[in-house]
Amino acid sequence: MKKRSIIYRLVTFLVVNFFYGFALYAGPSPQLLHRAERNLTRVIVHDIFSPPVASRIYLYANVAAYELLVMQDKNYQTMHGQISGFPDIPALKRDEKVNYQLAAVYAFFKTSGKLVFSEHLLTDSITVILNDFRETDTLVYNNSIRLGQAVSDSILTWSLTDNYAKTRAKRRYTYSKQKGKWTPTPPGFIDAVEPYWSQIRPVSLDSAGQFKPVPPHVYSTDPASLFMKEVKEVYDITKKLTKEEILLASFWDCNPFYLNTQGHLNFATKKLSPGGHWISIAGQAAESKGKNWQGTAAAYMMTSMALYDGFISCWDEKYRSQFIRPETVINAYMDEKWRPLLQTPPFPEYTSGHSVISAAAAVVLTAIFGDNFAFDDHTETDYGLPVRSFRSFKHASDEAGISRLYGGIHFRSAIVNGQAQGERIGQHLLSKIKVNR
């Protein structure tokens, strides 16, 4: 009886410790990471960050979460040694027990909190979400918070060297007076957004100009010129849009600062940025596939890298070519009362930013989830738009691109060449950055 009692206690001890260890490894559902991501997106919308700046926030927050989660899984690789200048990530002491999921969510919030204006909104979010970890042993909980803070500090220190602060101190952008160059557009005639973004340090690119696209068509007012044919195409298409084309363009609008004008009253409608839309798609795909914590974090991080490098490459071309917008040309030479369906954003036309980053994100997500990954995208339901269904990520990125033509804010060549630019960026990223061993 005594021998049986000893064996029983031994078995009980092993079982309890096995499940305790599993709980530390598996943690609660990755839904907590999805919730953290959605909360960050809401704050980015609230603070009205431009698309390039939003991509930077997503990048550092998601890298912080990923680096913590891969500490417990040898199937995934750290970014140290893969990204030039990437910092050493703080290591654990051998006898320290940690809940890596708790540490990852905490690092995500602490990193992003220092990159947004409304940090207090994320503080409220972290208080709610961390309550789901409260059953964790007090020592484990405290160790996890400490490790999360250490990793966040390391990533934030790295972020200080990406030239972002230097671009804040640059002189105001001076517009070119040459014909065919971009000038601010109605209704707000807002100054150029992020004219020095090409100086931001990329993740995988050797330089901002590594995937420089072919130049835009030569500006000409000759009706027979390639340029004026593109102008006429925008004008003709937008004059006879179908209900489906209007819905498609609205779904992919992703204008973080839509300016409403009513008499002397101006006010903004805040919306998701293009990058925020693709972060949402990455999350929906991960949920649909039932990805674990590491797989979910990898999908978010790789998508954010594609967006980040995509904006750097695209903005490099935008302020190199400084190309004129359809609205300016059409109002001057075809129809002074014409207005595009979508509001023209405050930066040069070529190439199409949404086309570049959508193509880059689609390449990365296809590599993660596979070709012909069908999904329903409910990203825009919060903004009163219906769910849209896609056959693949490529299908979604193609739709995002053509939406700019239907919206009247881009010429076709900016879309087509922007997509080619984005695809090359996405493929390059996959060749440089490996998450799986």
Image (tube, helix red, strand yellow):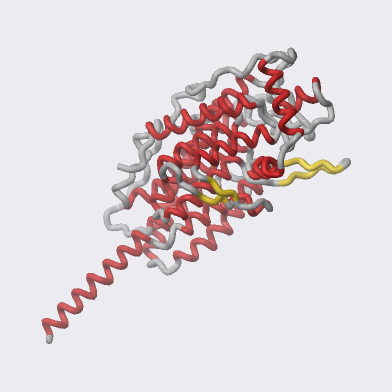
The location of residue 106, given as percent across then percent down, is: 47, 54
Of all residues, the one furthest to the bottom in this rendering is 1
Quadrant assignment for the N terminus:
bottom left
Tell me the residue at 41%/60% (across/down). 142
The location of residue 366, given as percent across then percent down, is: 44, 41
The location of residue 161, given as percent across then percent down, is: 49, 32
Of all residues, the one furthest to the right in this rendering is 263
Q: Nearer the viewer, residue 185 or 225?
A: 225
Tell me the residue at 63%/30% (across/down). 194
Q: Nearer the viewer, residue 239 or 122?
A: 239
* Residue 406 higher or lower than 119, as above or below: above
- Image-quadrant location for residue 429: top left
Is any atom of residue 153 visible in this view?
Answer: no
Quadrant assignment for the C terminus:
top left
Tell me the residue at 13%/82% (across/down). 4
Is any atom of residue 114 visible in this view?
Answer: yes
In the displayed structure, does residue 370 sit left or right of residue 410?
Answer: left
All told, the count of numbered labels is 0
Tell me the residue at 71%/13% (across/down). 224
- Image-quadrant location for residue 219: top right
The location of residue 128, given as percent across then percent down, is: 54, 63
* Residue 23 higher or lower than 260, as above or below: below
